[in-house]
Each structure stands twice: as structure tokens, then as C-alpha cells.
């Protein structure tokens, strides 16, 4: 299926879409959209565009997940209660999911390693 390109006009539209996606994702980390690789790709493109429009360290530094302890803690809590799918996921699947759920933030290798080794404390039947 061919889909026409959607154009987002200007810095403020990109910023508004970026903020809306960040808010929606943080509202429900258990949502199918929060860990979606498609949503993560869009979020990375939006953040890349914001970073390109406003060069310097601001956006680059902002994207470091270690600088967002509340968001990282929410992801930890989400993964702890994730249940069987998290338990059954292999290391690559876990790393991809963690990157996607944190997007457009970028986890350090140490943070990624920590988050991918979290055990779910929910019963495996869930």
C-alpha cells in the first residue's frame, strides 16, 4: 500500500508532536503503542529534526536517558510487572523493546544492560 508523505510544518509543529507522543507514551507504558518500534522510529526522527533545527548540546544532552530518572524508574516498574512475555523474551528482543519504550531517549550501554536484566515479579501465567 502506498501512503503519501505527511509533512509537518515548522519547528513548533514538530515540537508539539514530539511533546504529545512523549506525554501519551508516559501515560500508559503498558499500551501497545508505548513499546512500538514504529512509534519509536517516528519519535527519533522528530527529535533528530529538533536537534538539527537547534544545534548544540541541548537536545543531544536531553536525549540521554540517564538524565530522566523518573522516566527510567517508570520503565523499571513496567518491566518488573511485565509478566510472561518479558520472561520469555531473549536478550535482543529485550534490548529492542527497552530502546523503543525509552525513545527518543537513548539509554547508555550500562542502563540498557541493567534494564534488560530486570526480572518480572508478576506470576508467569499473566
Image (spheres, grey):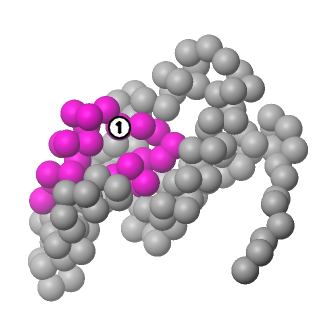
Give the x, y percent position of residue 61: 49, 22
Q: Is residue 79 magenta?
A: no
Which residue is located at x 57 percent, y 44 percent?
A: 44
Q: Is residue 11 above or below residue 33?
A: above
Horizontal relation, residue 123 to residue 29: left or right: left
Which residue appears at 51% of the width and 67% of the height? 33
Examine the structure image and report whether residue 102 is included in the region drawn in magenta.
Answer: yes
The quarter of the displayed image where residue 46 is located: top right
Q: What is the residue that sits farthest to the front in this orientation?
A: 2
Please give the residue where the numbered disc 1 appears in the rendered image.
Answer: 107
106 left or right of 88?
Answer: right
Tell me the residue at 81%/44% (across/down). 13
- Which of these two is toward me, 16 or 7? 7
- Residue nearest the observer in this picture, 36 or 123: 36
| Above or below for 13 versus 36 | above
Disc 1, SS: loop
Quadrant for the N terminus in the image: bottom right
Q: In percent of the image, x 69 and y 27: which residue is there?
A: 52
Can residue 19 be seen from the camera position used here?
A: no
Amino acid at each position: 500500500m502506498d501512503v503519501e508523505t505527511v509533512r509537518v510544518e515548522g519547528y513548533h509543529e514538530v515540537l508539539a508532536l514530539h511533546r504529545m507522543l512523549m506525554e501519551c507514551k508516559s501515560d500508559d507504558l503498558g499500551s501497545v503503542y508505548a513499546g512500538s518500534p514504529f512509534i519509536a522510529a517516528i519519535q527519533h526522527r522528530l527529535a533528530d529534526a529538533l536537534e538539527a533545527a537547534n544545534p548544540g548540546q541541548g537536545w543531544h544532552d536531553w536525549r540521554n536517558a540517564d538524565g530522566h530518572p523518573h522516566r527510567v524508574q517508570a520503565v523499571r516498574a513496567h518491566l518488573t510487572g511485565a509478566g510472561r512475555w518479558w520472561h520469555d523474551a531473549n536478550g535482543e528482543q529485550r534490548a529492542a523493546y527497552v530502546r523503543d519504550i525509552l525513545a527518543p531517549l537513548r539509554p547508555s550501554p550500562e542502563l540498557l544492560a541493567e534494564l534488560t536484566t530486570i526480572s518480572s515479579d508478576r506470576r508467569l501465567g499473566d
